[in-house]
Amino acid sequence: MRSDRFAPTRRSVLAGLAAAAALAPAGAVHAAAAGRDLRAIPSSGERIPAIGMGTWITFNVGDDAALRAERRAVLQAFFDAGGGMIDSSPMYGSAEEVLGALLPQVSGTGTLFSATKVWTPVFESGPEQMAESRRLWGLDRFDLMQVHNLVDWEEHLETLKADKAAGRARYIGATTSHGRRHGELETVMAREPLDFAQFTYNILDRAAERRLLPLAAERGIAVIVNRPFRRKALIRRFEGKPLPDWAGEVGAANWPQFLLKFILGHPAVTCAIPATTRAEHLRENMGALAGPVPDEAMRRRMIAYVEGL
Amino acid sequence: MFPYTAEVLAAAVAGYNADYWLAAALAPLVLGGALWLAAYPKPGGTRLIGLLLAAAWAWVGGVFHLQVFSVINFMAPVYALMFLAQAGLLLWLMAVRRAVVFERTGGWPRRIGVAFALFALVGQPIVALLLGGPIGSVRLAGVAPGPTALLTLALLIMSSGRASLALAVIPMLWCAAAGATGLLLGVAEDQGLVVVAAAAGAALIATRGRPRTGV
């Protein structure tokens, strides 16, 4: 299996035009996207769906056949909904191996945007770990290779740059999560030629708004948002509470979509990567790809609403 | 934060028990023999108990942690080292140095130790089943870390000698880690383990320093 770029289609061009229109000053919401919300990677202009999928915990199911069958259904639902980015890591136990086993069993994987990470404090073992990841996924190259949690980033980034030049990765990036090490990530983003930066951002964890998101916009770095639901915590916190009457104005039919729409409303965000073990939840998440995107005024209204609950 | 769920852990243990069903069936019986030797000491018994416990810790480290748990948990190789170190300590202090002694006479340490040991061998699997866990996922002494650690603490309660405290450090650490995992993942069985292990640790400390007649 190999991962292909998104070829421009009439639909993606229309979506791009809609997204461009959305950047213009607007009222409560940006103009409704025509079809899926595709976002441009600043360093190339290539467009990818704004909702991807994380695999932390969810795809670490080992050899269990029943659990693998459930994850296969999630994966199929992801591609059925036009999904693109799947993000994993060698740190995620069996997740990469499970993905590699399941991807050939589902259809529509031509849109896959494969993203993984290098995660080893021993610099010398980085290339070997990345080669193992390619073997596990069944890929000749990754679309995106990131330095996981900035572990040994100065050394690993040199390898990543060489891998990009040699065609073993199309894009390179660096990650952090849980709001940690923002200062160090900021340094990396300011200094290094990153295509992507990944960090935590959600309606309650908004520290990234201060420096990281503006810096990404300034430097032309695509942003992947992890922990959009603080794992499940935000869903649990808000489920059972009413959505605001005006949730439809931002295209949210449920809490997951409301929370994802908030994230997608930030113009510097390229892709959010919620994770799930259930196909029906996956479909809910992917529903956030359609419909209007909140502008800044509406995002402030969304914050005020959830903080008042 | 752990990279797996309780459901995945149960599935991994079920697969492990199925793959190594003979070891899973025999280990509690063999360790039941170690309990018998601790309760009714015989010449050379300490050495044999040390060998049996060391074999159990080495198995859990080398097979459970390195081959099974490592698939879903990146920390498993560290746990394996811990278990292999404990196996080495048991071999050295019990089988070689005989720095742990099991006494002929009874008393409350013996009774408490037997109670904790029976819980590790039989009670914990029954509790896991009563809590609704599938029978295939039951964790057994000698092949799974939690009950092996608890059984080791129980046998140490029945012993005398300063080395028994040193031998209790890693089992206590494991039980604490397992309890924390149980709390975060919502596994009642592991939450219970930390409570029982804390009681066993307290009993172990309370029984130190008593003059005993050893074999």
Image: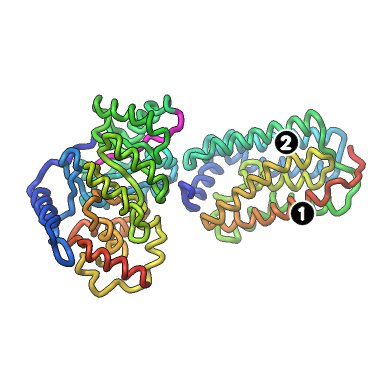
Q: Quadrant of residue A23?
A: bottom left
Which stretch appears magenta?
A113-122
Q: Amino acid at mark 1?
A: Ala
Residue shown at 91% from the left, 45% from the top: B211
Query: For the residue carrying disc 2, how many other residues have a C-alpha within 10 Å: few (<14), some (14-19), or many (20+)?
Result: many
- On the same chain, marks 2 and 1? The answer is yes
Which quadrant is home to the N terminus of chain A?
A: top left
In space, the residues marked 2 and 1 are separated at their CA atoms by: 19 Å
Q: Return the residue nearer the eye: A207 or A200.
A: A207
Q: Is residue A126 above or below residue B153?
A: above
Relative to residue B55, is residue A114 drawn left or right?
Answer: left
Q: Which residue is mark 1?
A: B115
Coordinates of residue B21 in the picture (x, y in percent) = 58, 41
Q: Amino acid at mark 2?
A: Leu
Q: Quadrant of residue A244?
A: bottom left
Q: Which residue is mark 2?
A: B52
User: Magenta segment: does it hold A143?
Assistant: no
